[in-house]
DNA sequence: TGCATTTTGGAACGGTTATTCTATAATGAA
DNA sequence: TTCATTATAGAATAACCGTTCCAAAATGCA
C-alpha cells in the first residue's frame, strides 16, 4: 500500500520526552528533536501537528513512565510509612546529574504553568495523583500506628507533594545535599520507622485500636539506602 | 557636557525585573524590554553589555527589593514562632494573580539553574539567606518554648525554605489553595502559636529554662490575616 | 554661539525559529 | 511491472531573535 515508517513511534516519543526534560519547551528546537530522535522534520510534523502537541504527548508519556513508576515504588513497600520514608530518602540520595535534571513536571509547571492552561491542568492532575497515593499510604500508616498522634494523613500528604516540588527546585541550583536531607527529615518527622518485629506484632491490634504502642525506634538512624535510579 | 539620560536607571531596572519575573529569561525579548521600560534599544545596550547582564542585575534588584522585604517581615513580628507562622499563612492567602506569578528566584532556578552557574550560585545564596533567617527565628522560638520537643531549628528551617519553593511551583499551575493551606499547616506543626499573655508571662522564665510551660493554644484556629502584597 | 560628548531612535545584520513545500524513495496491491 | 500512497530528506519561507551601527538630537562648557 504505502511506504512503511522507518522509525519506532514510541521510541521517538521517548527521545523527545528526554530532550524536553533536559532543555525545557522553549529551549528545545525542532532541530534538536530531529537530531536526538533521528526522525526527519517532515516525519515529526506527520506524527504531530506542531511542537506543542509533541510536548503535550511527551508529558503524557512522562506520566505513564516516570510518575507511574514512582507510584509503583510507593505502593511496593511495607509497611506503608516506610514506603513513604524510603521514597524521599532515595530521592535526596540520587546522583547529582539526576538531581540536576529535576522533574519534567516541575520544570514545565514553572515554564508554562502561567501561559498554557491545558499543560497546567495536566500537571495539576499529576500532582494530585501523587498526593493521593501519599495520602492512601499515610492512612494505612496511621492504621498501623506509624503516624505520630495528631498527624492528619491528608494534610501531611499535601506537605509531601509540596516538599517534592521544593526539592526539585533546590536541586536544580545544586543545593547542598545535607540541607535537603534535613528538609526531608523534618517533613517525615511525623512518620515513625517501624522496626520489623514491632510492625508484625502490633499489626492486628493496630487495625482496630487506631494506633499501636510503638517501639522505641523513632529516633533510629536512617540506614544507608540505594540512590534512586 | 553631554546629553543627559532621558530615563531613570533604577526605574528602568525595576521594569525589566518585572518583565523577567512575569515571562522568564527566554520568554522575554529585547523588544519586550524596550516596550515595557520605554527605554530605547541603544540605551539598554548602553547600560548593560547584553541581555543576560540585565537579567543578572534584575535578579540582584529582586534580592534587594523582594527578598529583603520578606526578611524584614520575618524579623518584624514577635514572638519569633508567630513571625514564621504568619509569613507562610500570608503566603498562601495571597491573591491568585500574585500566586500565579510566583517568585523570580524559583522561576529562574528552574529555567537557568542547569545551564548558568553564576545565576545558580546567586539563587543558591538567596535561598541560604532566607533559610538562615528562618533558622535564627526558630532558634529564638525554641528559646521561648514555641517549638515542640525534639524539633531542631536548622532542620525545620531547611524544610521551610523547601516548602516555600514547593508552594511557588504548585501555585504556578493554579493548585488548590486549600491544599496549600494544609501543606503549610503540616510544615508549621512543630511551631506552637503563642497566645500573647502566655508569651509575655513566660518570657523571662523561658529564656533560662530552655522552654516554657505552654498554654493550651496550640490547636487554636489560625485567625484571618491580610494577604501578602 | 559653537564644540565635544553622549543619548536617542530606528534601520540593518546575521542567525535561528517553527512551519511548509517539494521532489524523491520505498512500499503493497493490482 | 505499474500504480497509488506514504515516508523521507532537505530546501524554502517568513518571522523573530540578540546585537550592532549610524545619523540626528540634545546638552554643558568654552
Image: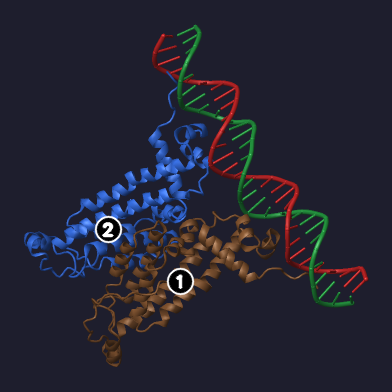
Chain colours: A blue, B brown, C red, D green
| Front residue of this view, candidates D15 and B83 | D15
Give coordinates of residue A5: x percent, y percent: 43, 27
Position of residue B148 relative to residue C30, above or below, is: below
Q: Whole-Å distance between the Cαs marked 2 and 1?
A: 43 Å
Please, which chain is the residue tagged with disc 2 on? Answer: A
Residue A151 place in picture, x, y as percent: 21, 68
Which quarter of the figure has residue B127? bottom left
Is residue A36 shown above or below B212? Answer: above
Residue B72 appears left or right of C2: left
Q: Position of residue A197 (x, y in %)?
A: 11, 61
Mark linked to residue A47: none
Q: Secondary structure at mark 1?
A: loop
Q: Are marks 2 and 1 in contact (CB under 8 Å)?
A: no
Residue A226 x/y as whole percent: 29, 55
From where the camera sits, is residue B116 visible? no
Residue A221 visible? The answer is yes
Q: Quadrant of residue B199?
A: bottom left
The residue drawn where x is 28% and y is 56% is A131
Foreground tag (2 vs 1): 1
Q: Residue at x 45, y 45 (%)?
A: A19
Q: Residue at x 28, y 89 (%)?
A: B197
Pinpoint the chain carrying mark 1: B
Are marks 2 and 1 in one subunit?
no
Quadrant placement of the N terminus of chain A = top left
Residue B229: assigned label: 1
A105 with respect to A89 (left or right):
right
| Helix, strand or loop at mark 2 | loop
Give the vertical position of B142 relative to B101 (above or below): below
Residue A149 quadrant: bottom left
Location of mark 2 (residue): A225
Crowdedness of circle 1 by 10 Å Cα count: few (<14), some, many (20+)?
few
Amino acid at each position: 500500500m504505502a511506504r512503511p515508517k522507518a522509525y519506532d513511534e514510541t521510541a521517538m516519543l521517548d527521545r523527545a520526552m528526554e530532550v524536553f526534560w533536559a532543555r525545557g519547551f522553549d529551549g528545545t528546537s525542532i532541530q534538536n528533536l530531529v537530531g536526538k530522535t533521528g526522525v526527519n522534520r517532515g516525519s515529526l510534523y506527520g506524527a504531530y501537528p506542531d511542537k506543542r502537541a509533541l510536548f503535550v504527548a511527551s508529558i503524557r508519556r512522562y506520566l505513564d513512565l516516570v510518575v507511574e513508576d514512582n507510584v509503583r515504588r510507593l505502593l511496593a513497600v511495607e509497611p506503608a510509612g516506610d514506603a513513604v520514608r524510603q521514597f524521599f530518602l532515595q530521592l535526596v540520595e540520587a546522583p547529582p546529574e539526576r538531581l540536576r535534571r529535576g522533574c519534567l513536571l516541575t520544570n514545565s509547571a514553572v515554564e508554562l504553568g502561567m501561559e498554557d492552561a491545558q499543560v497546567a491542568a495536566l500537571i495539576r492532575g499529576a500532582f494530585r495523583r501523587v498526593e493521593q497515593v501519599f495520602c492512601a499510604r499515610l492512612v494505612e500508616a496511621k492504621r498501623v500506628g506509624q503516624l505520630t498522634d495528631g498527624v492528619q494523613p491528608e494534610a501531611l500528604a499535601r506537605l509531601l507533594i509540596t516538599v517534592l516540588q521544593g526539592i526539585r527546585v533546590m536541586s536544580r541550583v545544586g543545593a547542598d545535599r545535607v540541607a535537603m536531607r534535613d528538609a526531608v527529615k523534618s517533613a517525615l518527622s511525623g512518620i515513625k520507622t517501624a522496626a520489623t518485629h514491632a510492625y508484625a506484632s502490633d499489626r492486628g491490634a493496630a487495625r482496630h485500636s487506631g494506633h499501636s504502642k510503638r517501639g522505641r525506634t523513632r529516633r533510629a538512624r536512617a540506614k544507608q539506602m540505594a540512590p534512586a535510579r
